[in-house]
Amino acid sequence: IAEVRAARGGVDSLKKGLRGLSILRQHYEDLQNELFPLFERYSPRHACVRLMWSIEDDVLGLLDSLIAADPSEGQDFWNRLGAFYLAAASLVYRERWILFPAAFAALPDEARSQAAGAADAQGATGAAGALLRTSTGALNASELKAIFSALPVDISFVGADDRLKFFSDPPGRIFPRSPASIGRLVRDCHPPKSLDKVMQIIESFKKGERNEAEFWLKARGSFVHIRYAAIRDEKGTYLGTLETSQDIGRLRTLEGEKRLL
């Protein structure tokens, strides 16, 4: 019994340690949304970021499966633990000796803060006095910004040139983005495992073969609905693609009616 308890205690400690490694997700998102866009902007030799993004996804997938699994289930758990360790360790090496030296050799001094500041300034000065007028009403820039932040969906708009032009930034955004992503090609804003599908959707929009595509899946501990919609003008000319993402886990549990506060 003592040996079983000791073994169980070791397993519990291991699981606690794995849960503590969830900080890796934030680290990888910082790289993907802050450093990768700048590296792509200032250096033509940035092909390594796509490989790293793919490995990062593999590492996070392995980590999630390990946290959810029971080590007593058998050898498969320990095989996955070994694969996780090797993949995560390889990323540490790639970051320290390949990515960081190459990226920072290519970036001008203070490029990150300058890029973020330029994006903020563009949003502030480009729209500060603007007014959206349509047949259904009018809104100023402050109202538009507040509305986008209050919507229960995350919004990203990619222009006809396949570059990110706008994204909303509500609290608890499902898929994080940063101001440095503005102007980034859409193919560089998605992990490699989903890139082919995204590009296939956009091409079908451009050709007029379809006007929307939707998916629902489990991601980041949420049940997420994702919808892509082709944006066209009055003549049907393709203007870009609108992506909306929403955590619908709570909506799926609703029953009956609610009519009172």
Image (cartoon, rainbow, N blue to C red):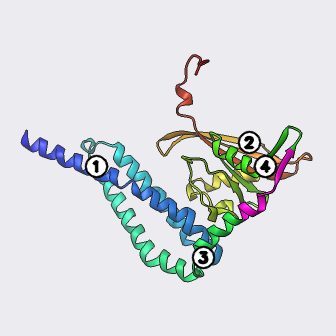
Relative to 243, say whether 251 is above or below. Answer: above
**Residue holding disc 2:** 212
Say few, some or many: other residues with alpha carbon within 10 Å of mark 3 (under 14 / 14 to 19 / 20 or more). some
Choose mark 3 or mark 2, whichever is in front: 3
Magenta includes 254?
no
Could you tell me residue 194's position as x and y percent? 59, 53
Q: Is label 3 in contact with label 1 (beta carbons under 8 Å)?
A: no
Q: Which portion, as a residue range, is magenta?
A: 122-133
Which residue is label 4 attached to? Answer: 140
Q: Residues within 10 Å of mark 4 (few under 14, many from 20)?
A: some
The amino acid beneath tag 4 is Asn
Mark 1 neighbour density, 10 Å: few (under 14) some (14–19) many (20 or more): few
Q: Give whichever of discs 4 and 1 has the lower sequence position.
A: 1
Q: Position of residue 187 (x, y in %)?
A: 65, 61
Q: Secondary structure at mark 3?
A: helix
**Residue 101 shown left or right of residue 8 in the figure:** right
- The residue shown at (18%, 43%) is 8
Pointer 1 with pointer 2, Cβ within 8 A: no
Mark sitting earlier along the chain (4/3): 3
| Residue labelled with disc 3 | 111
